[in-house]
């Protein structure tokens, strides 16, 4: 198997992921659907699959793989379409060595391309605090974060520090100074990198994932000490996100952590990706929670079950329940009702929005033309 040829085909067909495993043909994920290439490629032997995968690794990475039985790496190939980067998970499984490649676009999408809501765009102008992006793997959290980081890079002379596992998007420095660190290559872990980050004079910190108590604690501390912190969690709605953060801590600390989170949180965005009704491409639907005084009080007092009420009551402030975002896109014929029902956390609310005779909500878009000028951007900040 010729790996560059396979990856060139993946780029041509707009695949988001490529799956390699012994005893089956390579498979592409295109617009969310997994499509095996049985006509183009016969099933791979374990020897061919292992040779292709190990050929990407350095001796140190092979040693890590042999010890841990899995490894995450970033990788680049010079293809006819240009240099293409991948985030790759390599793991051993029943039939041998396998890998899943996530294609990383060479350009960071604009807010318009991501159909980004204005309230999310405004996160890039915050001076400090914690902003969380949540959702399942493959829902575009990293891409939305990269867009926000690049907005800051375009308009602000700040130091942006990213800690990722592995590095996905790479940035060309514009107004900002950007430092990117990768777990396993530049640092041993999120915790140690964040401890060091507080002495590296950052203005903005991107933490690839808040996956353990130490990382969460340090991200809260960084937010408290005057930094703007972006990070991700694998949760499906805003109330679950708050509870996940609190529940990581021992019971004796949870009241203090609630108060800490209530004071630093700026917003939570839960994102899903759905196939467009046209059959080509995907579009994001988002639940957006902004940290209003009422929201901060609910978090502080442990009333996270009431956060959904804040979402429905905060539309004028830029908030949006996921079901409302889905309903708006169904009404605009951007997605199908069946797909919307498949990802809705509260299907009855989705039906209520669609059945409402007074339904006229349009997810706020961005009038970005006037924001391309740095001076006007700063005025809005």
Image (cartoon, grey):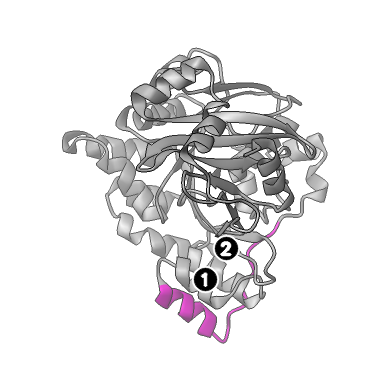
Distance of label 2 from label 1 (alpha carbons): 8 Å
Judge the density around disc 1: few (<14), some (14-19), many (≥20) Cα neighbours within 10 Å. Answer: many
Q: Is residue 195 left or right of residue 25?
A: left
Residue 25 pos. (x, y %): 54, 51
> What's the residue at 38%, 26% (across, down)?
218
Question: Dot 2, how many residues are within 10 Å of its Cα: few (below 14), some (14-19), or many (20+)?
Answer: many
Residue 262's place in the image compared with 311, above or below, is above
374 sits to left or right of 144: right
Q: Quadrant of residue 58?
A: top right
Spot occupied by residue 94 in the image (x, y as percentages of width and height):
35, 43
Check disc 1 and report the residue beneath it.
Answer: 340
Quarter of the image with the N terminus is top right
Is there a contact, CB below 8 Å, between mark 2 and mark 1?
Answer: yes
Which residue lies under the disc numbered 2? 274
Location of the C terminus (image quadrant): top right
State which region is magenta.
Answer: 347-365
Is any atom of residue 174 visible in this view? yes
Residue 166 visible in the shown view: no
- Please check the rendered image and state whether residue 358 is part of the magenta-colored stretch, yes or no: yes
Q: Residue at x 19, y 35 (%)?
A: 250
SS of the residue under disc 2: strand
- Assess whether residue 249 is covered by the magenta stretch: no
Marker count (numbered): 2
Q: Could you tell me which secondary element the residue under label 1 belongs to?
A: helix
Q: What percent of the width, then of the height, locates residue 251? A: 17, 38
Labels 2 and 1: the sequence-earlier one:
2
Could you say which is closer to the camera, residue 140 or residue 256?
140
Q: Does 312 sit above or below residue 96?
A: below
């Amino acid at each position: 198997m010729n790996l560059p040829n396979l990856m060139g085909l993946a780029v041509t067909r707009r695949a988001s992921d490529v799956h390699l495993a012994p005893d089956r043909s390579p498979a592409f994920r295109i617009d969310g659907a997994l499509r095996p290439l049985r006509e183009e490629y016969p099933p791979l032997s374990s020897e061919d699959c292992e040779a292709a995968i190990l050929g990407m690794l350095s001796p140190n990475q092979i040693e890590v793989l042999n010890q841990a039985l899995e490894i995450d790496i970033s990788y680049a190939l010079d293809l006819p379409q240009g240099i293409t980067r991948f985030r790759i998970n390599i793991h051993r499984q029943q039939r041998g060595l396998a890998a899943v490649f996530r294609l990383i676009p060479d350009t960071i999408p604009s807010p318009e391309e991501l159909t980004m809501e204005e309230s999310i765009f405004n996160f890039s102008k915050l001076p400090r605090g914690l902003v969380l992006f949540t959702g399942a793997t493959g829902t575009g959290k990293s891409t939305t974060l990269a867009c926000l980081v690049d907005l800051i890079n375009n308009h602000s002379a700040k130091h942006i520090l990213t800690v990722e596992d592995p590095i996905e998007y790479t940035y060309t420095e514009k107004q900002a100074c950007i430092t990117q660190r990768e777990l396993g290559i530049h640092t041993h872990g999120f915790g140690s990198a964040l401890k060091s980050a507080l002495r590296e004079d950052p203005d903005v910190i991107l933490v690839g994932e808040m996956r353990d108590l130490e990382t969460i604690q340090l991200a809260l501390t960084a937010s408290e000490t005057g930094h703007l912190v972006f990070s991700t969690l694998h949760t499906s709605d805003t109330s679950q996100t708050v509870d996940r953060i609190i529940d990581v801590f021992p019971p004796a600390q949870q009241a203090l952590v609630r108060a800490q989170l209530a004071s630093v949180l700026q917003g939570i965005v839960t994102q899903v990706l759905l196939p467009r009704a046209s059959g080509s491409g995907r579009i994001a639907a988002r639940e957006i929670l902004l940290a209003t005084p009422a929201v901060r009080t609910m978090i502080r007092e442990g009333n996270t079950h009431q956060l959904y009420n804040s979402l429905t009551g905060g539309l004028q402030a830029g908030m949006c329940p996921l079901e409302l975002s889905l309903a708006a896109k169904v009404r605009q014929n951007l997605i199908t009702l069946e797909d919307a029902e498949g990802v809705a956390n509260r299907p009855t609310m989705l039906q209520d929005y669609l059945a409402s005779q007074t339904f006229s909500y349009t997810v706020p878009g961005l009038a970005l033309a006037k924001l391309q000028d740095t001076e006007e951007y700063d005025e809005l900040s």
